[in-house]
Image: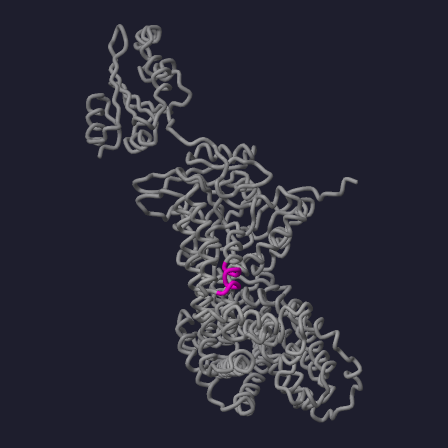
Amino acid sequence: MPKNIWNSLEKNLQHIRTLFVDCDDLVIREIEIGDVIRVKMAIVFIDGLISKDHISEYAIASLLSEEEIKSLSLQGYRTTILEAIKKEGLATAEISEKEDWDSIINLILSGDTLLLIDNSEKAIIIGSRGWPSRGIDEPKTESVIRGPREGFTEVMKFNTALVRRRIKDTKLKIKIHQVGRRSKTDVAVMYIDDIVDQKLLKELNKRLKDIDIDAVLDSSILENLIEDNYLSPFPQLENTERPDSVAASIYEGRIGIIVDNSPFALIIPGTIGTLLQSSEDYYTRWFEASVVRVTRIAAIIFALLASPLYVAMTAYHPAMLPSRLTYSLAASRLNVPFPAVIEAMLMELTMELLRESGTRISGPIGTTIGIVGGLIIGQAAVEAGIVSPLMIIIVAITTIASFAIPSYEFSAALRILKLGFIVLAAILGLYGIAIGLIILGTHLLTLNSFGIPFTSPYSGLGIEDGDIKDTLVKAPIQRLWLRPGFTHPRNKKRMKRGKKNE
Amino acid sequence: MSKDLKVSHIQIRGLIVSSVIGVGILSLPNILTILLGKDGWIAILTIGLISIPLLWVINQVFKENPGKDFFQIGRETLGKPIFNLLLVSLFGSLLLYCASLSRILGEMVKAFLLSNTPVEVIIIVFILATSYIATCEIDVICRAGYFMYPIIIGFALIFVLLALPTADFTNILPAFQGDLTNLPKGILNTFFSFAGFELIIFAVPYAEDKKEVLKSSMLAILTITIIYLSLFFITLTQFTVEEIQNQIFPVLIIAKNVDLPGYFLQNLDGFVVAIWVLVIFASVGPSYYGSGKILSEVFSTKSHKNFIWLLAPVIYFIATMPENMIQMERSIGRIRNILGIISIIVVPALIYIVGILRRRLSK
């Protein structure tokens, strides 16, 4: 493939036509201007990726208008046509000169317009990106009672702008990388230069550079490509649909990553502490937020251990429960023909089915599935004597608890590991659960997120002890005057220590 | 030594507390009252005091050889053959420590949780689960220690609080009534309950803030001594001396007798044992790691992972060899204590003294 463009328009167009053969969305518009000397030109773009009005009105119309032609023909003797057109011929905001085919083709495919001029060594690229896109909408997954309602869209430029609006600082850097050999997806890396830990940034850049894949369609694919342990069931990066939460993380010394065509931004590093935070916590009062955060820890325990504990208790250690509870439990299980483990597995799998079908079909049918599944099957199963009422209660609590965990991937991992815990509890009772906790705990402890312990701040280096105030609970803003320590920010202080205004 | 591993002094504190406090705490009041009656606390206090100079020596050795790990220092000061011989004793003590802890755990789980499951199964499952963390590197081991540290302290606190309503403090007195001629024997037996802090030799070289390590590890020993003392006294307030002498795990019997307020759970002993499985895991894990690390050093291999898997059946075999706990204490326990004393006291002291002599001579 030739490196640079030729100065013959015919040859250039021929080259483009051979490259884009059978690509019927390519548009080539040839024009001729000038009175004294006729100058041939061609405008090349991809249909649908550009704003057509913009090109017609400010590029083609301005080139064809009479005055421009005159001035062009007059100046044609003193300066090159290219210079003249650049200076006076075009009325668009963003133009640049390009000569190498690689970047020209790339820009055409990204939605810019190419202006080729006969007898010119260089081509002009007119910034004209404009494609149909969804407007800024309320985030579907992370809704808040109080706080901004903007969510990311699929267009990277809009998304970076949404973050930039929240950080009006020249220190906010937005570096754009291209990832994917064929998809050439734009990936914007955003950080505040004098807060972020340079080691973290270097590691991220290295991992982005190492990626060699044909296409990155969504941020989740990028997430899998850059995380530390891709075999782990747990996500080691945070993802969010909310620009405010990306901005807040960037202010904490973390790095935001926005992938074109994905409304989900990634935030690194992600730890247990950050995966259990919701942006709501920062917009409600500290007291409520603290209670909610402790509740989330309880939700993890419920989501993971409620059913296994039921199985262990009924099968192995009924004496551990208060005697009255043991009696009522035994009475309710009297008619159940299965051992507790089958009962639990049956109900958990039913719940799993309901959840899956509910996700695939949203709207009114989804609600129907929820009602039919949750109420009718549960009721009927108890009346038919297949499961005990207590099991239904436990499965319901488990499911509700798993939705109280802000990170969907994290709660999904727990939900599936729970089945393993049920099996362990069925084989070895409470001891089996303890063994399961040992293995799961070890796995969590081995995880890193870009070199930062995943279990931080509960089990990091110990320097993150202060982070407990913003992970286990949420202290008032006046008490969070230092940035969290787990990201090793270069600039620790974020506010003047506050006093009460009374 | 690899450079990208890093631990902090707080993690080392956690590592000491979690690897020392294991099964010893549950049976310590029993052993001590048999030997010393109500004066068992003297033995606890003495061992606590003895550990402090040992920690200082270990710390001093690393201070004088900055940037080197324990094996490099040992090889350079003592020479390879002598050092390897000493390593074998350290290896033996760690391995026997793992084996005896696994056995005690097996017996405990069988007695309190799974009366129909064979001890062998319980031990196998435990060893396999623990191998996972033993194959990891020291930073993960330290994270585990740091994670267990608040849990252990919290549990000790809850225990004391739960036992307070039924406590009879007059039981503690009179002091100094027992036969103090048994004191050396009592100290030797308490020694097993304090074993585990020597594992910091694997962690200290990677510490980021070396100046704090000594203070932090002293604090850890102080914490352990306080926990041991308070549980010893709490046990005394609950039972008479004769009762304690007849219980292998008197602390667990307290849990059995205590009801949680509101009667949500009865017979807490099962729960305590289930959680104690995690605490014992936190003490077996580092020792298991240490023994694997020593093997990989002696055979100079890059990774210690394969040795961990090789050691699993060995630990299982040693753990299931004795017929009962008493026999185990007599055979394995004795060898373990002797090897333990050699490796904890003699090895660091020898390296320290030879190091000083070498420097003198070279001047």
Residue A199, above or below B28? above
Residue B363 visible here: no
Apparent side of residue A399 relative to residue A3 in the rendered image (left or right): right
The percent position of residue B110, horizontal first and vertical second, equals 52, 81
Q: How many marks?
A: 0
Magenta segment boundaries in residue numbering: A388-395
Q: Nearer the viewer, residue A345 or B293?
A: A345
Identify the image quadrant of residue A105. Answer: top left
Q: In which quarter of the image is the C terminus of chain B?
A: bottom right
**Residue drawn at point x = 21 percent, y = 21 percent:** A8
The percent position of residue A144, horizontal first and vertical second, equals 56, 41
**Helix, strand or loop: magenta stretch:** helix
Q: Which of A187 and A260 is in front in this view?
A: A260
Residue B34, above or below B50? below
Q: Which of B357 and B301 is in front in this view?
A: B301
The percent position of residue B41, horizontal first and vertical second, equals 72, 82
**Residue drawn at point x = 55 percent, y = 69 percent:** A329
Apparent side of residue B160 relative to residue A46 in the rendered image (left or right): right
**Residue drawn at point x = 66 percent, y = 44 percent:** A285
In the rendered image, residue B82 lying in the magenta stretch gets the answer no
